[in-house]
Image (spheres, rainbow, N blue to C red):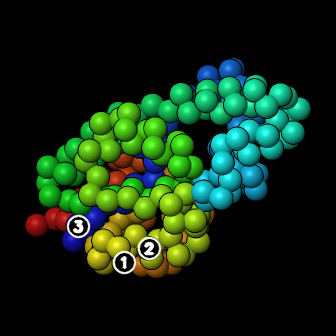
Amino acid sequence: MIRNVIFDIGGVVLGRDFSRLAELLGDTFSFIAGNDFPAYWSEFDRGTYTREEVASMLASDKGCSIEEAQERIQALLDLLQPVSETVELIAELKGEGVKTYVLSNMSREFYEHISTTFDVFEHFDGAVVSCYERINKPDEGIYTCLLERYGLEPSETLFVDDKAINTAAAAELGLHTVTFDEQGVENIRALLARHNQA
């Protein structure tokens, strides 16, 4: 039985229209679609750099003013919107008694904003976020932090993330995984059906 489902946030629970992102911000945040994040952004997620420090580094990296860099960061945050199919699935899982959790690489400023803005966060039974733990996925420590904190058995737990590097790390610890894409919700439902048949 799978009794617990852990969700990444960006690209799974909340998404961005990347065509609109490119239209508004050019290639400023093109790294978000891949795995090769600039060091300053990884440290922002880790909680070791402030938004002001990151804005200064982003301005230097992209050749813009610090004020414009701040505006670009805010635009990136404002573009986050719920992925409706994932939100519906989370509500269904809760209704079925499945525990749901958050495991995300995200800065304090971003997480505090989204967790108080979007109703889906009311459904989660717990969360481990990189900025508070000072450790990012795919480091093994962030996964074991969540498992130990909430007493979860890996064999009873599914981890969903849009980056294969992160699901691969979870699989190494014995978790079931789904790498989220256009068929992500369908794949989650199929995996749960296989494991939770009466």
Q: CA distance from mark 2 to mark 3?
A: 18 Å
- Residue 30 visible within the image: no
Q: Which residue is mark 3?
A: 3
**SS state under label 2:** helix
Kind of residue at badge 2:
Cys
Q: Quadrant of the C terminus?
A: bottom left
Q: Position of residue 11 (x, y in %)?
A: 51, 43
Horizontal arrangement in the rendering, residue 31 relative to residue 118 (left or right): right
- The amino acid type of the residue labelled 1 equals Glu
Residue at screen point 53% across, 75% down: 141
x and y, in percent, of residue 191 in the image: 32, 60
Q: Earlier in the sequence, mark 2 or mark 3?
A: 3
> Which one is earlier in the sequence, the residue at label 1 or at label 3?
3
Tell me the CA gap for discs 1 and 3.
15 Å
* Residue 148: numbered disc: 1
Q: Nearer the viewer, mark 2 or mark 3?
A: 2
The answer to whether mark 1 and mark 3 are in CB contact below 8 A is no
How far from the left and from the top, in percent, is residue 118? 36, 35
- Disc 1 is placed on an element classified as helix
Residue drawn at (54%, 28%), measured in percent from left and top?
79
